[in-house]
Amino acid sequence: MIGFAEYPTFQVFLAIFVSMAITMVLLPAWIRVLRFRQIGQQIRADGPQRHLVKQGTPTMGGAIILVSVIITVLLLSKSTTQTNMLSLLLICGATMLTGLMGLVDDLSKVVKERSLGLRPNAKMICLTLISVSFCLAAVNFVGIKPTITIPFLPVIDLGVLTTSIPIAEGATFDIPWLYVIFVFLLMAGMSNSVNLTDGLDGLAGGTVMIAMVVMAAIAYRADQLNTALFAAAVTGACIGFLWFNSHPASIFMGDTGSLALGTAFAAIAVMTKAEVVSLVVGGIFVIEALSVMIQVGYFKLTRKRVFLMAPLHHHFEQKGWSETKVVIRFWIITALLACIGFALFFYQNLREIAASLAQ
């Protein structure tokens, strides 16, 4: 941004404020449009009975989150190196495509008046195409290494099984199969995990907000200002959204928001080489997804349930916790995990610097 180029930290904080402001300005009008069009949330019949009063609450608030993020990025992003701009474009592209898939999913729920939406196979095909395309572009055009770093352990090379296709003299298009599979699992997993977390007023918005603050710090630490601006814009949009999504919610983000935000989180992790650390920062999403997998797997084996209800936030509701208590405690857990994740990334970063100096 002209005039602020020498203050990158200020730009990151400005991105939070600008995105928050845009979201808070646009959402009231969007809520009125959704109510006029009678586009409301379909509540699952087997969910907590207290949630039935939420039937018909406007949904697809995620569309405004994504619009706010894109506008903020367009206003504040810096035209630096080609690689940095490509990184930002890839993150934005993957996020918007997943958001478009979520929008179709939300609209299908409204039209069919049921809570299921698109078929799981259709979602998985879309997520596969998005994640694989993102990974191959990141490796071949941005120069992302097909490796993962686990704190306190040696770097793991997932490029050992790579197919190189000649495309020009001295140039190849590389397909690191193991890394492609890893990125697919990370992006599809995070996308669905955030989607599962989006079950209580303010839960997904608040946890994503906290996690994205740390991802912005990680991107800034990795000297990727545009990526940091994107993460900060998501943070600001979530803050603005929470003003209307706090209990009792006036609007839900829907799959438009939750699926896209999960993809954005994973995409930033890939670009900053914080793939493993992101599993700690976004640990609450991992825990929510695991609770569903454990519940389904154990029930198929024994016809019994481990939790009173899955995902995990519903288990605590069934135990008598208020919705607000569950949300706030999950926010606290997310903040603790995010701090641990950033500390691990910081340690990893220092170790890499020390190794480069030793050489």
Image (cartoon, rainbow, N blue to C red):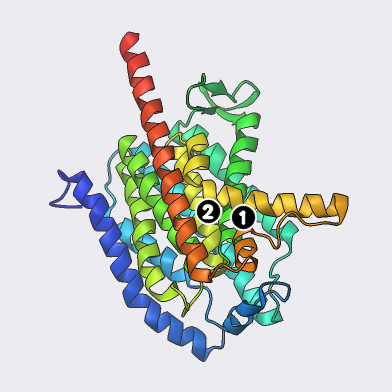
The x, y position of residue 116, in whole percent, is: 71, 70
Amino acid residing under circle 2: Gly
Query: Residue 167, labelled with which disc?
Result: none
The x, y position of residue 261, in whole percent, is: 49, 57
| Label 1: which secondary element | helix
Label 2 Cα crowd, 10 Å radius (few <14 / some 14-19 / many 20+): many
Q: CA distance from mark 2 to mark 1?
A: 7 Å
The x, y position of residue 102, in whole percent, is: 58, 65
* 98 or 169, nearer to the observer: 98
Which residue occupies 52% across, 58% down?
260
- The image quadrant of residue 80 is top left
Label 1 Cα crowd, 10 Å radius (few <14 / some 14-19 / many 20+): many
The x, y position of residue 203, in whole percent, is: 50, 63
- Say whether disc 2 or disc 1 marks the residue closer to the N-terminus: 1
| Label 2: which secondary element | helix
* 63 or 325, nearer to the observer: 325
Which residue occupies 41% across, 42% down?
87
Which residue is tagged 1? 192
